Image (tube, grey):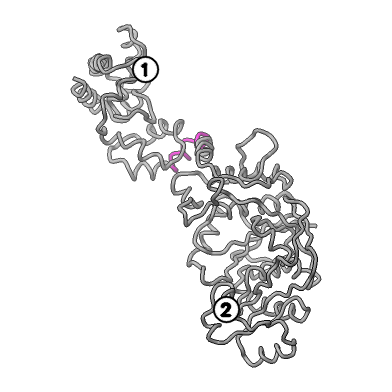
Amino acid sequence: MKIRTRFAPSPTGYMHIGNLRTALYEYLIAKADAEGKFILRIEDTDQKRYVEGATEIIYKTLKRVGMNWDEGPDIGGDFGPYVQSERKTLYAEYAHKLVELGGAHYCFCSKEEADEEKDEEQNIKFEDPCKKLSLEDAKRRVAAGEPYVIRQTINKQGKSKYHDEVYGDIEIDYDELDEGVLLKSDGFPTYNFANVVDDHLMEITHVVRGNEYISSTPKYNLIYESFGWTPPHYVHVPPVMKDAQHKLSKRNGDASFQDLVAKGYLPEAIINYIALLGWNPGNDEEIFSLDELKKIFSVERLNRSPAIFDIVKLTWMNGQYIRKLSEAEFLDYARPYIEGSLKRKVDIQDLCRVLQPRLETFGDIPNQIDFLDEVPNYDNELYVNKKMKTDEAMSKTALELSLSRLETVSDWSNDNLFAELKALAEENGMKNGQIMYPVRIALSGKAATPGGATEIAVLIGKAETLQRIKTAIEKLS
């Protein structure tokens, strides 16, 4: 059996982290097979939620993280069309056939109620009990143009039993299943019907989706059974949580993939991190490229427990990826953040060399370099540091000594400046930090900076360095 998986997002405007994780698991399952295929299908049957341009967002996101699809709306394939709204007549054909097979029935409502139709047809007052109409009577009313929907027929007793690759064997009472709408009065199918028809016709072998669909799966299996089709392998995964009680949700302000990229997270780091939200490699390794994930991923190591999205862990991981960038790659990523926030002219390559070893997200750059334009207003308490063994009086002395020494320096390079200040400390019986720390505070006005005292001095130049030290001495007087 050749593995065929599908990612079937709705074009609603952005890429939710949970959706991207589903796509990743579908992709990795397919690519574990040398001949496996990863299919992209756009599920746009819910026209009320459709957002213009959202399909392009889906394309760009998948391409940006390296998950290229083998079949899809833009590249075609043997099982198209790959957009559900373009398969509308197909669903109607199968829905009517399902009625003939006894797996569904017609329901009728007034035209006024149909015109006021709400999502999924759940709030329309259908004739009760509509399924007791004879098939001949129902067909006559359909032919007469009366508004109708097609609902699933569930008349089985006992329990539905099926196997899930994550949760094992599952049993659900048929009495717990509702006879949901399969084909709406506007001719569009609901998700519950369209995904079954498409998965069969596209020969999908593995379906990955959230565990909230575990209870609905028996309904899908009944449709497969009515048509005499073989169901796919089911891989239900737990949700991605904001905390122990709440799911990640865009409406609650939680970040989408696009939000994270805009904040300066690398796509490669995001993919690496979300792979670990519900799956583990079986050892302590955490950093994996997409190619490495394709080699080691297995469904057997998917977890049943919900995964909590930890932005701190993602930020740490992003920092690891930033360190691995070449100087040229780092410069390309960092340049827009630097040029968009800094007025002072600095050597951007020197600045990048200072930033790269310390940066965790590119979005941190503006706040980390704002002092290069102007020293913020700060309290002299910043000079008091137990670790460096400095206080205000000692810092004032250190700055006065540094000013005298730096005024005579002609080689304004980092190595030379560091050597000069180190020698200055030794000559005056002080520790290196008792000179370097006060100078860094004087030049930046911040407790934490992306570079040390001499690196900052090089970036802002000699004249600005001397002026800032003079200002700091006055502030301490």
Q: Residue at x 48, y 52 (%)?
A: 258
Q: Is residue 84 left or right of residue 161?
A: left
Looking at the image, can residue 78 be seen? no
Q: Which mark is residue 386?
A: 1
Which of the 4 quarters of the picture holds residue 162?
bottom right
Helix, strand, or loop for circle 1?
loop
**Which residue carries the number 2 mark?**
124
Q: Nearer the viewer, residue 199 or 295?
A: 199
Q: Residue at x 67, y 57 (%)?
A: 38
Q: Position of residue 439 (x, y in %)?
A: 30, 21
Q: Residue at x 72, y 50 (%)?
A: 166
Q: Position of residue 303 (x, y in %)?
A: 68, 45
Q: Can residue 239 be found in the magenta stretch?
A: no
Mark 2, Cα crowd under 10 Å, few <14 / some 14-19 / many 20+, is some
Q: Nearer the viewer, residue 323 or 439?
A: 439
- Region of the chain picked out in magenta, as a range: 322-333
In the depicted structure, whether residue 329 falls above or below residue 163: above
In the depicted structure, whether residue 416 falls above or below residue 344: above
Q: Residue at x 69, y 61 (%)?
A: 215
Looking at the image, can residue 380 be seen? yes
Mark 1, Cα crowd under 10 Å, few <14 / some 14-19 / many 20+, is few
Helix, strand, or loop for circle 2?
loop
Which of the 4 quarters of the picture holds residue 171?
bottom right
Q: Quadrant of the C terminus?
A: top left
| Alpha carbon distance from label 1 to label 2 | 72 Å
Q: Amino acid at mark 2?
A: Ile
Q: Which mark is residue 241?
A: none
Q: Position of residue 280 (x, y in %)?
A: 67, 40
